[in-house]
Image: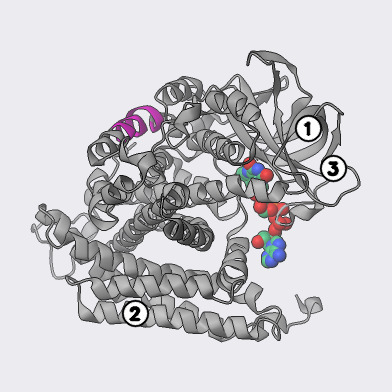
Amino acid sequence: MNPYNAPLAEMRFLLEKVFDAPQTWSEMPAMAESVDMDTAAAILDEADKISRELIHPINRSGDEQGVRHEADKVITPDGYKAVYDQYAEGGWVGLCGDPEFGGMGMPKMLGVLVDEMAYSACNAFTLYGSLTAGAALAIHAHGSDEIKEQYLPMMYSGQWAGAMDMTEPQAGSDLRNIRTKAVPNGDGSYKISGSKIFITGGDHDLTENVIHLVLAKLPNTSGISLFLVPKIKVNSDNSLGEANGVTVGSIEHKMGLKGSATCVMNFDDAEGYLIGKPNRGLVCMFTMMNYERLAIGIQGLGTSQAAYQMAADYAKERVQGVAAGGSPTGASSDPILVHGDVRRMLLTIRSLTEAGRALSVYTGQQLDLAKYSQDADLKAKASRYMGLLTPVSKAFLSDRGLDAAIMAQQVFGGHGYIRETGIEQLVRDTRIAQIYEGTNGIQAIDFLGRKVTGDNVATLSEFIAEQQANVNGFTHVSDADKTKVLGLLEQLLTVAKQVNENKLTQPALINACAVDYLDAFGYSLYGCFWLAMCDAAHDHEDDNFKQQKAHLSRFYFDKLITKADYHLSQVSKGDACIMQMDASLF
Ligand SMILES: Cc1cc2nc3c(=O)[nH]c(=O)nc-3n(C[C@H](O)[C@H](O)[C@H](O)COP(=O)(O)OP(=O)(O)OC[C@H]3O[C@@H](n4cnc5c(N)ncnc54)[C@H](O)[C@@H]3O)c2cc1C
């Protein structure tokens, strides 16, 4: 199996040269003293090492062995516990957590890159820490001081894990239908009863406790509230008490992610504590969901990077056919890398992965600004941009992740369909990223229906004006590429305004056209990022790095960016041909 090597030079380049992280950090008191480029580079080096040496080695064996449900316990594959202990001891679960509660206080701009490495190394393992960090974020944002003090240090340290308990058999995309009940005990706590399905990390043997964030309904309300429900009750001195009526009904047997425990969880009068206000549970849970949505986009990105590395290595080794125009070495067969179609696939994966990484770092930067900036206007703007970018990061990165895995599998030919090469695992593991955390269809509807047209296109207009200014400011890129991107940005705005004007008279328009609009936005934004990367790379000290950027951006602008035109044209075609066929004809 190929070892995973993180693209460290690329990651440092994005932080330092493209998004000027040192400047962003120096302007935020919470970051100024704790992180600079040297610290960030050292953390990236260490994350590369643990991803390669610690996490990647359990990727394949975890897939083969899978999780087991035995006597009311869920057992993770061999090696997971030992790796998790080291991962937690290294402080990686609490990397971006609040130092007041034991977190390391690192910026999300850096955190997204660490997450990407871990997902590249092993999708299934990385979910455990990700769910814990997301649950901790929601507790930090909405929990009482007492709850924060009791739970956050144990979660940041990785001693206790987190889980997100929303889905029920009759309530998936539409959470209004949940039936789990919460009845007040009269002492500030609640009795939680009900069943949840598909709960990632709902139970496992990696940690001594699992902290469930559960959506439930209070008596006589249709509103949804959020409750913290520990698997094992916690005493006031933080020692573990008795079991809390939280049991595993079963585990799911899945297409991929075999090392990740996906559980049916039963709550039988389990003791829970309200997080946030009654009936405001979805708002509070959105803190965790938005975190996980970005994380799942990064799952797709990490998969793309791993897929690229495996396919590029294979293309250099596998010998079949002769190069068009004759073998460059005079051999009777050449490595498949000589063939135009194989190169097309590798360049597609890589140019989308590098732009995707830029999207992930940019989104991380907006998160940091929204959280830590002292400038009220900048903070509010970053928060608006986060709203806009979260569904895009989740859906566009995870869609491209599956595309990348499948294309890389194609590079392997028949060997890609055989388990030994390992590439088919990436296809199976990343497929779910398009589905969970809200399907990508739901993300697109959120994007076009709420984020783009919900404020009559105000935030999108602001965002696009900023991108246009950035593009106009680039001086080391081709004018033709700039013109192409500027034209697309203008069209994105025009089409969004058309949808906004027509949404009342054509009620199905947004739902039917949202995926195309999100894709058009994604490919256009990647155009902005390719210009930004080329502009920043023009004086890079490494000539190979500069050349790679020039070739990859040329490929992107010649071959891929026109996908944005296609998707915009689909939105303009409207919903009639989708909605007119009678249901009886399906
Ligand atoms: C491996 C795995 C892990 C998971 N982990 C968790 C977890 O940790 N916690 C948790 O709470 N849940 C978890 N889930 C559940 C997951 O988030 C849901 O499966 C997902 O949100 C979709 O819900 P559903 O399966 O009920 O599909 P449905 O909601 O039934 O959707 C079916 C199809 O209809 C479409 N659709 C539905 N409504 C609309 C609409 N209004 N407009 C347009 N299209 C629509 C969907 O996009 C989809 O294509 C997990 C699921 C899996 C498989």
| Element class at badge 3 | loop
Q: Nearer the viewer, mark 1 or mark 3?
A: 3
Q: Which residue is drawn at 57% across and 37% down?
A: 140
Name above or below for residue 207 compared with residue 10.
Answer: above
Q: Residue 89 versus residue 410: which sits nearer the camera?
A: 89
Magenta segment includes 50: yes
- Label 2 environment density (alpha carbons within 10 Å; few <14, some 14–19, many ≥20): many
Q: Nearer the viewer, mark 2 or mark 1?
A: 2
Q: Furthest-right residue in view?
A: 220
How much space separates mark 1 and mark 3, taking CA atoms? 18 Å
Q: Which of marks 3 and 2 is in front?
A: 3
The overriding secondary structure of the stretch rendered in magenta is: helix
N-terminal of the two: label 3 or label 2?
3
Name above or below for residue 312 compared with residue 218.
Answer: below
The residue at which mark 1 appears reads as: 266
Q: Which residue is drawn at 32% across and 74% down?
A: 469
How much space separates mark 2 and mark 1, taking CA atoms? 53 Å
- Label 1 environment density (alpha carbons within 10 Å; few <14, some 14–19, many ≥20): many
Name above or below for residue 398 compared with residue 449.
Answer: above
How much space separates mark 3 and mark 2, taking CA atoms? 51 Å
The quarter of the displayed image where residue 573 is located:
bottom right
Magenta segment:
46-56
The residue at which mark 3 appears reads as: 218
Q: In x, y percent, where is residue 558?
A: 28, 75
The residue at which mark 2 appears reads as: 486
Which quadrant does the C terminus fall into? Answer: bottom right
Q: Which amino acid does label 1 sit on?
A: Asn
